[in-house]
Amino acid sequence: MAYHSIQGLAHGRLDLLNQLRTFLVTTTGWTLHDDQSADPQPYFVFKSHGESGAEDIYLQFRISTTSGRIHVAAFQYWDAATHTGVNEASHTSYTYLRVEDSADFIFWLFADLDHVFVVTKLVSTYYGHYSGLLKRFWSGAVALTQAAVTAGSGVVLQVNDATVVTPGQDYVIKDDAGIERVRVSAIDTAATPNTITVETLVRDYASGAKIGEDPQPVVNSYYNAPGTFYAVNKFDGWTSASGQQGRCGAANGGLQGETDPEMRYGTTILFPWLASMSGSAVYQELRGELIEIFSVGGGNVASEDTIQIGTDSYRVFNLTTGGWCAVKE
């Protein structure tokens, strides 16, 4: 599916929730994985396999018990039969869309099968929220286990393709129930199926589990993105809903105001928003960047202006806390 964007008017937060459902499912191609619109706190869980078809993205948007909010949570997996999630990434105080309960407000939605970015305008203040995949700096290639495996030492995994890993390196393995970091000690690409041997496996994994450098770089941001976010996993798995904290920073070196516009030809510079894990020292790493969201200076634009670069159009917002951003339309 292609990249899509719309601007609209919401008649309160429930209306935005319903318009988000239509946009993601009908326009963009996400799956409505769990429809709980009749719940006392109505919510939807959307699922996507990403633009590559090989990803696992589960996002929940729910009417919050706190006024002015639609709560957002990301999950490693969501069971639609029991309406429960596995390994949540969220925070009750921060990961939400800033909205009006019943009054009208303007919104913008930007999405592909990898992510969704929501901007809401309340009076004259703009709020942004990012959820979904990062444009990862690590490889997205994964090997799929061909049979269930049991925890232990020197565990041999039957996989479809062992060439995606290298002996002596660490990787992440995940299924719908668990996730952990493992060290590969050996591979056999001549065997049918291929095999990967890992030094230690803490838990059991089902057939179809994925092993790779970064098999699920799903994040869920604060209501005033770009800024702080929570990831479904850090490089060695999941600890708690808010235990995988990261943050976004514009790669502009503080010089964006001096490129407004570039003097020689009057051009506009788009700086990527980089995403890093920012927990304890052992987890600090540059993870990737936000998809189709860029930092710009605000000297030659106003919020809601568009910037044309080649055949691409970018909508500009001065987001609260996040600053001047240009989002691809």
Image (spheres, grey):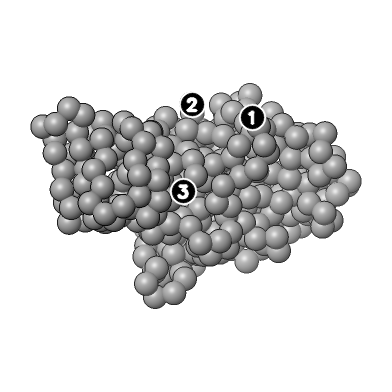
Circle 1 residue:
32
Q: Is 101 on the left-hand or right-hand side of 98?
A: right
Quick one: label 3 or label 1, which is nearer the N terminus? Answer: 1
In the image, residue 10 above or below residue 223: above
Amino acid type shown at disc 3: Gly
Quick one: label 1 or label 2, which is nearer the N terminus? Answer: 2
Alpha carbons under labels 3 and 2: distance apart: 29 Å
Structural crowding at the residue carrying mark 2, measured as other residues with C-alpha within 10 Å and reported as few (<14), some (14–19) or many (≥20)? few
Q: Label 1: state its secondary structure.
A: strand
Circle 3 residue:
178
- Residue at the (82%, 34%) spot, across then down: 38
Q: Label 2: state its secondary structure.
A: loop
- x then y, percent, for residue 224: 64, 60
Structural crowding at the residue carrying mark 3, measured as other residues with C-alpha within 10 Å and reported as few (<14), some (14–19) or many (≥20)? some
- x then y, percent, for residue 212: 31, 45
In the image, residue 249 above or below residue 205: below
Q: In the depicted view, which residue is nearer to us: 29 or 40? A: 40
Q: Nearer the viewer, mark 3 or mark 1?
A: 3
Q: Nearer the viewer, mark 1 or mark 2?
A: 1
